[in-house]
Image (spheres, rainbow, N blue to C red):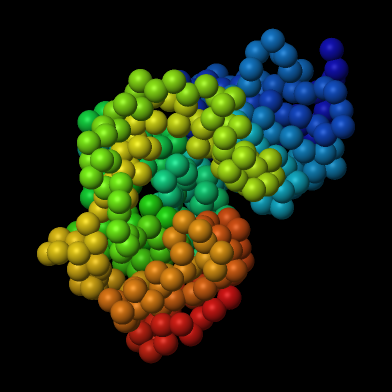
Amino acid sequence: MPAVPDYLERLIDRWEPDAFDAPGHRARIRLGVTGKPSAYDVTINGSDARLAPADTGKNPDATLTADEQTWRKIGDDLRGGMEAYHRNRLQIRKNLHLGVGFLAATSGLKDAGRLEFHRVKTRRCHISYLQAGVGDPVICIHGLGGTKGSFLPTVAALADEYKVIALDLPGFGDSDKPIAVPYNAAYFADATTALMDELGIEQAHVIGNSMGGRVALELGFDHSDRTNKIALLAPSLAWLRERKWAAPLKLVRPELGLLQIAPRPIVESILKRLIPNADDGWTAAGIDEFLRAYLQPRGRAAFYAAARNIYLEEPHGDDGFWTRLAALENESLFVWGKRDRVVPISFARHVEDVLPAARHVEIDCGHVPQVERPKETHRAVRAFLGASGQTAAARSPRAATA
C-alpha cells in the first residue's frame, strides 16, 4: 500500500466539519496526483474524516486532481485550495458541492467569514447554499440548469467586503426537488426570501445570472422591501418575437421528465457536442453540476418546468414582463455578453427604452459573465454596489463598457 503523502495529511489535520455539508453526512472524496498512479480517498462519516490509499472498488462522490507541486502549496497555504481551483491548477469533477466543500473544510480558516456549505429547512423546502465574507449581504442566484457553484468566482471577488450567499434554487443542485410546484420566477423569488428568513436577513443586494436574473427582477417586483440593488448578468427576459411553439408547449406537462429515460453517457455526449471546450475547467465542472440534477427524475421535471415558464412568459399586458419592468424601483445594473447567444445583447436597447435609469455594461463574453470574464464582471458589480444612488443615477446607461 502506498504511503499517504505528508501534504495531503496536512489537509486532514485541518479538517473542520462545520464548514462541510454532505447528504446523509457521508461522502468519499478522491484525491489524485497528476502523473502518479496512486490516488487517495478521504472517507467522511459525520464529523470524522479519514485519509487512506484509494479503494478502487468504490466510486467516489467527488474527485480532486492536481500536480504534486499544487497539492504541496495547498497543504502549506491555508487559502491555497480555492486559489488553485480558480487558477485551474486543481480540477474538481463529479460533485462541485462536495469538492469545494472539502477545500473549505480543510482550509484551516476559522474566522466568521470563512467559506462554508450548509443546507437548511425553509417554509418552502430544504435549500442548499454556500456563504463567505462579512458585511452587507449579497444573494447570488444561478441560471437554468446551473447551481450555486457558478457563483464561486463572485464569492471570491466580493467576500472581502460583503457577506456573499449563493443558493441552489429548489429543483436544482443540492436543494430539494418538489413535485407539482410552479418553478416560475414568483416561486423562486419566494423560495429566496424563505432562505433569507432562515438566515435572519431582512434585506440584501441581489445578483442573478440568466434565469437567476429573472428571479432577481421578480424580487424587485414583488419583494422590494427585501431587495436593495440588483445586478443582472445576462438575465433571462420575456421574448419579444413571436413564440411559435407557445400553444403546443402549453399542452406538454414537465412532469413527463419523471418518466423519461436519460442514460448519463448519452446525455453527456450530447452536451459535449453542443458546448465548446466541454472538458476544460469551469465548463467541465458546470456540465457535471447540470448532470447531477438532470439525471434525477425530479431534477428533469424541475428543469423542464422552469424552461417552459421562461419560454411562455407573457411580454405585454397588465401583468406582462415588460410592463412590470417599467415599474421597477430598485437601482439596477445589466451586464451583457457581446457574444451571448442565449440572451442577445440586442435586448439592451429594449431595457433602455423601458427602464432608462438602469446602468449597462457590455463585456466580451458569452452567457455566464461571472465565470467567463470574472475580473471585468466583478469590477463592474463592485463599483455598482458601492456607488451611492445619486452617483449611479448620474451616469449614462452605456457609460461603462468592458
Marker count (numbered) = 0
Residue 281 occupies quadrant: top right
Residue 104 visible in rendering: no
Place of residue 395 in the rendered image (x, y in percent of width and height, measured from the top left): 42, 87
Apparent side of residue 107 relative to residue 150 in the rendered image (left or right): right
Say if 390 sits above or below 386 in the image: below
Which of 371 and 240 lies nearest the eye of the viewer?
240
Which of 1 and 376 lies nearest the eye of the viewer?
376
Place of residue 333 in the rendered image (x, y in percent of width and height, measured from the top left): 41, 72
- Residue name at image x 30 percent, y 47 percent: 245
Apparent side of residue 358 relative to residue 118 in the rendered image (left or right): left
- Residue name at image x 26 percent, y 47 percent: 246
Which of 353 and 219 lies nearest the eye of the viewer?
353
- Residue name at image x 51 percent, y 81 percent: 400
Apparent side of residue 269 relative to residue 186 in the rendered image (left or right): right
Say if 76 sits above or below 364 in the image: above
Place of residue 73 in the rendered image (x, y in percent of width and height, measured from the top left): 79, 45
Which of 348 and 93 lies nearest the eye of the viewer?
348
Residue 369 occupies quadrant: bottom right
Apparent side of residue 182 relative to residue 291 in the rendered image (left or right): left
